[in-house]
Amino acid sequence: MRILSLALFVLLSALSGAILVGKIPAVAQIESGGTVAGLSPSSGEALSANPPMDGPVSFADLVEHLTPSVVNISSTQKSEMPDGSVDIPQFPPGSPFEDFFDEFMKRRGRDAPSVPVSSLGSGFIIDAEKGYIVTNNHVVKDADEVRVTFHDDLTVPAEIVGRDEKTDIALLKVVPNLKHPLKAVSFGDSDVMRVGDWVVAIGNPFGLGGTVTAGIVSARQRDINAGPYDDFIQTDASINRGNSGGPMFNLKGQVIGINTAIFSPSGGSVGIGFAIPSNLASRVVDQIISYGHTRRGWLGIRIQSVTEDIAESLGLKDPSGALVAGVMDKGPAKAAGLKPGDVILSFDGKKIDAMRSLPRTVAETPIGKNVDVTYWRDGKEGKVQVTVGELEKAEKDGLVPSSEAGSDRASGKGVEVEGTGLTLGGISDSDRREFQIPDDVQGALVVGVADMSEGAEKGLLVGDVIMEVNQQAVSTPEDAASVIRKAGKGGRNSVLLLVNREGDVRFVALRLKKE
């Protein structure tokens, strides 16, 4: 019995010693003035590419170093006069309804002044000398005034240098003040981040300002259907409304993501947030600085995923690559000889594992570069050289509707109707077969419906045919667009459309957005 007790004492002593030894390095690191989170307490500069495996003892030094570089952003947009957004029924003079509706509209505030609509978000300084600040596009979109508030509560006006809706990135500029020097942060390499790595988010949730949260990278390469170049970093660090545009840092104090979206049934953080990878964001920012807008590569094709059934029917071993569903007449792919039915396997030496990786790969390729494209056709591989075009120029020239860029459907040239969110085109024989349009139906084909637009709200879909506008028959997209624009210029707040969908006809009242 004594022997067992002695053995147990020795075992417990050994275990206790192991636990104490496990704590010594972290304690000694702090007491000896070592680094915490890969930073020097005196300079705040990154020292090591490999942070402690068990995480930092505290984020305090990291946060103290980074907080001055994070800003709060507020934007205001003038709202429309209430009477400019409501159609008032017209009654004969002296009608009792005339007085009723007049009194009703006064109570609704018809004669009240417009009230600015405010939006709050976050951002971070990337160039202290030039005053460049990065944020989300949706934070400043349609803003009449943008103001930036620094960590010490100083507020200054900001100018929008450029925006990119496809990646939801915007670049702002403030005038540097010698009495208030700015402190910038740099982009890190988001590609080296692994699931499980620590991240720190700083932002302006719910307008509180200067709020710090920490978590880990929960997943990589998330596609949340926000745009054609989705490649989000998912994190469990608390991200809420107002965090949009704020930075996500690694433990070296580098920006590896821009906090952009959350998944939440309640509107608050449930531990699922998404950030734009820094490697994608930095390219967009550089292009905005250089050109004032983005310049993306363009092939001029419509693509879709390769399923197992498609791969089997084409003789492919694996369901990988991007299937060419259509080739635009004046695009680079057409000139190079690519055809519908081809499967693109590699682009510029980069393997295309899935359809969604091709748009981003093409977009990041320098315009005018000759690249090798490997494709699958007729049971064997082929190779062709393509000269990469410019997406923005193609949109401007009408070769691809800008609202449809990067989507699965692009019907060549389209007519965008401002204020409706609709892109209209002509009706081809293939369109009649695809959308079951009767031969005797004439009009303008809906080839694009912008997200969150009036057209989308009223349930219009690609494939609908607009036969009449305000009871005037239309036979081309130009006719329909002309009548709609004329109605808007004439002060009309809405237009009445006669829409045919697969032979069923209905009327749709479409409100016109005031520019």
Image (cartoon, rainbow, N blue to C red):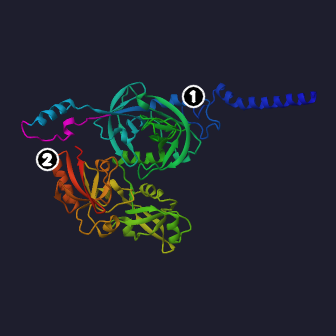
Task: First in sequence, mark 1 or 2: give its number.
Answer: 1
User: Residue 505 lies in what quarter of the image?
Assistant: bottom left
Q: Which residues are magenta?
A: 75-94
Residue 318 placement (x, y as % from top left): 55, 65
Task: Indicate whether 464 appears above or below 275.
Answer: below
Residue at the far bottom in the pictured view: 378
Distance from Cα at disc 1 to Cα at disc 2: 66 Å
Residue 218 placement (x, y as % from top left): 55, 43
Quadrant position of the N terminus in the picture: top right
- Nearer to us: label 1 or label 2: 2
Image point (46%, 35%), residue name = 268
Residue 284 placement (x, y as % from top left): 41, 47
Q: Is residue 126 left or right of residue 504?
A: right
Residue at the far front in the pictured view: 96
Task: Indicate whether 8 appears above or below 434.
Answer: above
The mark found on residue 490 in the picture is 2
